[in-house]
Image (cartoon, rainbow, N blue to C red):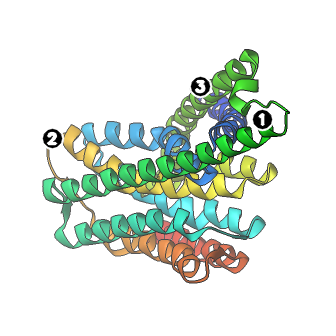
Amino acid sequence: MELTITILLFLIGIVLIIKGGDYFVDAATWMAEVSGIPKVIIGATVVSLATTLPEMLVSVIAAVDGKVDMAIGNAIGSVTANIGLIMAISLVFMPSVINRKDYVPKSILMFCGSLVIVASGKTGSIGFFLSAVLLILFVLFLIENIRSTQHSMHKNSAALQAAEYAAIQNGSPTLSKRADMERSVVLLNIFKFIGGAAGIVIGANLLVNNGSDLARYIGISERIIGVTLVAIGTSLPEFVTTITAIIKKQSSLSIGNILGANIIDLTLILPISMFCAGKPLPIASSSAILDFPACLLVGCIAVVPMIISSRFRRWQGFVLLAVYAVYLILTCTA
């Protein structure tokens, strides 16, 4: 009976995540269109913060409970899964030319976060100093997003004023999109945004908690659960957001969400987990040798060619999928 309930809750989690992701992307896309903020910025801030809540909750709870391997494995494994699996799928189906200035700052911050994590593997723990460095990177991420948003809104406002002036000169009055919005449309999208985020978070927690129980029935170690089942499970919001974005042809939202989610995973989740635990988080040798370098490797494959060529290419997606498959094999056989 207990196993049946676990499987049922697991399936309910999947349904909530899928429907929540659909509503969430609709609302986030609407926000980008009516505000004039680029979708990459919406994806890298609002969407990312909501879709990383499962990782945050799981890692903090695990750290406080003394399950350090799961806390660290979930945070780092989620980044590796986000890039090696989810971003890879996005690139396979939606290679694209990009505006490099929208992506390069976030890519550099993600890369720096990965380097700090690799360095922590050399020291043997994530302590107060490295946590402070990671938090500084997170603050820089917020500053960059605020700067980009202000710049975008200024340009959008100037263009709107110019259009309105031209229309008045021509004798045809016009209103902005926001003025034309019916209250019902605004309320509907607010409901989609809040309801979608709630569905993602609740669904991911149901899936992870009950998925972990299923894994324990077959005797999988805590670290392997952390970097595989829990990491992939807590990355499902990003996965569903990406699949929905592919269907709706919103590649900027998808990549922006993944980059933002990875920066938050790397620079915020582990420091908060460490402070909540009240002591440095010891790092398992297997994590330092395999998990951390794998995270850095997939990050390099994803962003270095983009920085050089100003585009994401389909071959990057295939290479990332291959590297991630090898990583999973090594993890499960180590």
Secondary structure of residue under mark 3: helix
Residue 299's disc number: none
Residue 98, compared with residue 68, is above or below; it is below
| Distance Cα–Cα, label 1 vs label 2 | 62 Å
Counting residues from the start of the chain, the first of labels 1 and 2 encountered is: 1
User: In front: mark 2 or mark 3?
Assistant: 3
Image position, residue 314 (x, y; %): 72, 75
Residue bearing the label numbered 2: 278
Q: Residue at x 76, y 19 (%)?
A: 182
Residue type of the residue flagged with mark 2: Gly
Above or below 175: residue 318:
below
Relative to 52, say whether 147 is above or below.
below
SS category of the residue bearing label 1: helix
Q: Which residue is mark 3?
A: 194
The reply to whether dot 1 and dot 2 touch (C-beta < 8 Å) is no
| Res 168 label | 1
Depth check: 33 or 45 in front? 33
The part of the image, by quadrant, that contains residue 57 is top left
Check disc 3 and give the amino acid type. Answer: Ile
